[in-house]
Image: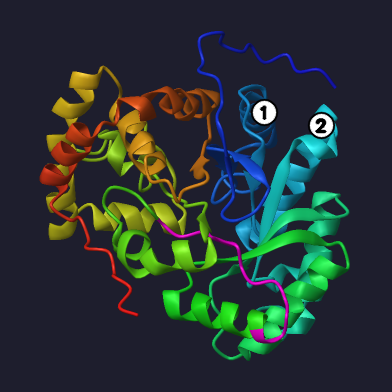
Amino acid sequence: MASTTDHPTDLPKMQYRFLGRSGLQVSVISLGGWLTYGGHVENEATFACMDAAYKSGINFFDCAEGYAGGESEKVMGECIKKYGWKRNDYVISTKINWGAANGDNPVNNGGLSRKHLVEGTKASLERLGLDYVDLLYAHRPDRHTPMEEIVRGFNYLIDTGKTFYWGTSEWNADEIERAHHVATRLNLVGPIMEQPQYNMLVRERVEKEYSLLYSEHGLGLTPFSPLKSGILTGKYNNGIPDDSRFAKSDDAYAKGMVKRFETEDWVAEAKKVAALKPIADKLGVSQAALAYAWVLKNPNVASAITGASRVEQVYDAVKSVSVVEKMTDEIMKEIDEVLGNKPVPLVKRF
């Protein structure tokens, strides 16, 4: 089905990167459905954002069984059907761990047991209207389920054609290493990607804790929150604007963010973000573009997942692709001096 959305002609050409040590290529900017699609954004706005993303060269769309009680998957599936996208042309992921919406009894509708991995994935595919997802994540670790059961469960889903690759989200380095150890011992496939939070203000795990996993296992990253809920755009430096989502929304997440703006940590972060503005101005880019480009400068990042409630936000994210080449060593050093939070990577000792 053709779209009527006007599409700008001045966007940079989308770039694609291999996802970790795999042959799969994903757009460096991807679109996620957390807290928006199926939740706080009307379906037509969701369709417009996904259509704008697809026309801009974005081929990777991320959701989860726990997003809006499964509604995010439903809306994404409806969009794919609405526009008639060819299955070969896009990459879609979902995440399994919180599937309370799948049944009436929460017992066994969560976690990473083989039962929930298989049943949860089946339910997600039904909501998406797809035969398979390209990527399947363990949405947070499950320390009640043996690692061997988790690894075998994901490999069963690969072997039965329900997904092509599996990965993790917000697992620690030891848990990812143990998953690979089990997979190697059993001659199975280990996790090839991790979806952590990563941005200018949150970098310890990606740049230090995971540092040995990139060379050892070819771990690829698809980080979320590159703008840290919009903080790195600079629009919250002087408080919460009346027209912002946090000011208008009364959901639990927005209320929590509003409370956070009153803390000392927030004041310290706001000062750092404000101090980044001269660097963005020098490059002639927005602070949002600077933040996206900074994340993409990391060679271990395959794709930065952005959330968008308006088409303009999709285009702003795509424009950052052309900013990466401006992120010279000198600019990166200036940013590090402002942030003062650069971790020291781990060093392999044997």
Q: Amino acid at mark 1?
A: Tyr
- Colour theme: rainbow
Which residue was labeled with disc 2? 85
Q: Is residue 256 left or right of residue 118?
A: left
Query: 144 or 5, which is in the foreground?
Result: 144
What segment carries the magenta color?
Answer: 185-197
Eyeballing the image, is 159 above or below 250? below
Eyeballing the image, is 57 above or below 167? above
Percent across and percent down for residue 78 are 80, 40
Q: Is residue 213 left or right of residue 205?
A: right
Q: Is residue 91 left or right of residue 12?
A: right
| Label 1 CA crowd tier, 10 Å (few <14, some 14–19, many 20+) | some
Percent across and percent down for residue 304 are 48, 43
Q: Earlier in the sequence, mark 2 or mark 1?
A: 1
Q: Are marks 2 and 1 in contact (CB under 8 Å)?
A: yes
- Residue at image location 48% in from the left, 28% down from the top: 313
Which quarter of the figure has residue 208? Answer: bottom left
Q: Amino acid at mark 2?
A: Trp
- Residue at image location 88% in from the left, 68% down from the top: 160
Eyeballing the image, is 185 above or below 229? below
| Label 2 CA crowd tier, 10 Å (few <14, some 14–19, many 20+) | some
Classify mark 1: helix, strand or loop. helix
Eyeballing the image, is 282 above or below 303? above
Quick one: quadrant of the C terminus?
Answer: bottom left
Query: 158 or 43, which is in the foreground?
Result: 158
> Can residue 187 be found in the magenta stretch?
yes
Which residue was labeled with disc 1? 54
Q: Estimate the spatial distance between the alpha carbons at disc 2 and disc 1, rounded to whole Å.
A: 9 Å
The overriding secondary structure of the stretch rendered in magenta is loop
- Residue at image location 18% in from the left, 20% down from the top: 282
